[in-house]
Amino acid sequence: MGWAAWILFFGLLALLPVLAQATGGHAVRLFDSFYRAGSLVFGGGHVVLPMLRAEVVPPGWVADGEFLAGYGVAQAVPGPLFTFAAYLGTVAKGDPSGWLGGLLTLVAIFLPAFLLALGPLPFWSTLRLKPSIRSTMSGINATVVGILLAALYDPIFTSAVRSPADFGLALAAFGLLMFWKLPPMWVVLFAALGGEAVAYVWQGV
């Protein structure tokens, strides 16, 4: 079972880009993009944001505003951030889209995690005792912190904070979440209404 999972994982990782290039089919390209995103991300779900944005925004599948709006909504619901893929597949331009596109991207981004869990499982009890493996995992975990900070800056900060008012709104939302311990759903609602108010005031000016 372990070897079969490894073969399937690396086989899809190598063959899907070739198949997407050869066929040009939107469904294959969509599955390939989200499968690679799920395969190459290590750590928290926020690490996947720059990769997903690079996959869906430049080709024109999802507008930048739609991407950031979906990310904000994803923060208000429980569960892993990878479920954000279902939203992207649903709103993506092309065929399939809608619920079928959402299901396709959701399966594609979660499949590598299942294969990577099954692959090392038979060997993990031996591997985790090796000092080299343990030090490698510690190094990767430390690197993830830097990647998370980079993801916070780009695309979140650079795309959403464009004026002093935006910065103040972001600080207020941070305070409500961290110090007043408001549920994320209410913080997202506050930020959405605040963003509309800021945009209205700036348009008026």
Image: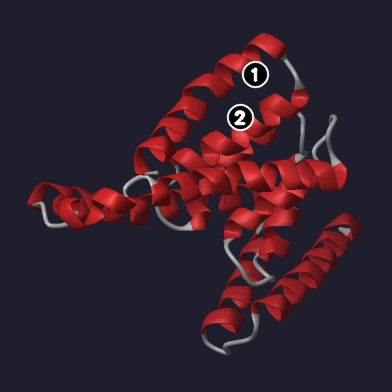
Query: In percent of the image, x 75 and y 19: which residue is there?
Result: 25
Q: Where on the picture, by quarter, is residue 29?
A: top right
Q: Pinpoint residue 135: horizontal percent, then vertical percent.
A: 15, 52
Q: Where on the picture, by quarter, is residue 189?
A: bottom right
Helix or strand or loop: what does disc 2 sit on?
helix
Q: Which residue is mark 1?
A: 20
- Of the image marks 2 and 1, the number of the one nearer the N terminus: 1
Q: Which amino acid lies under the numbered mark 2 shown in the image of this protein? A: Asp
Callout 2–callout 1 Cβ contact below 8 Å: yes
Quarter that holds the N terminus: top left
Helix or strand or loop: what does disc 1 sit on?
helix
Q: Which amino acid lies under the numbered mark 1 shown in the image of this protein? A: Ala
Quarter that holds the C terminus: bottom right
Residue 152's place in the image compared with 18, above or below, is below
Residue 205's place in the image compared with 173, above or below, is above
Q: Pinpoint residue 203: horizontal percent, then vertical percent.
A: 88, 55
Residue 107's place in the image compared with 188, above or below, is above
Query: In percent of the image, x 52 and y 28: which residue is there?
Result: 12
Pointer 2: residues within 10 angstroms few (<14), some, or many (20+)?
Answer: many
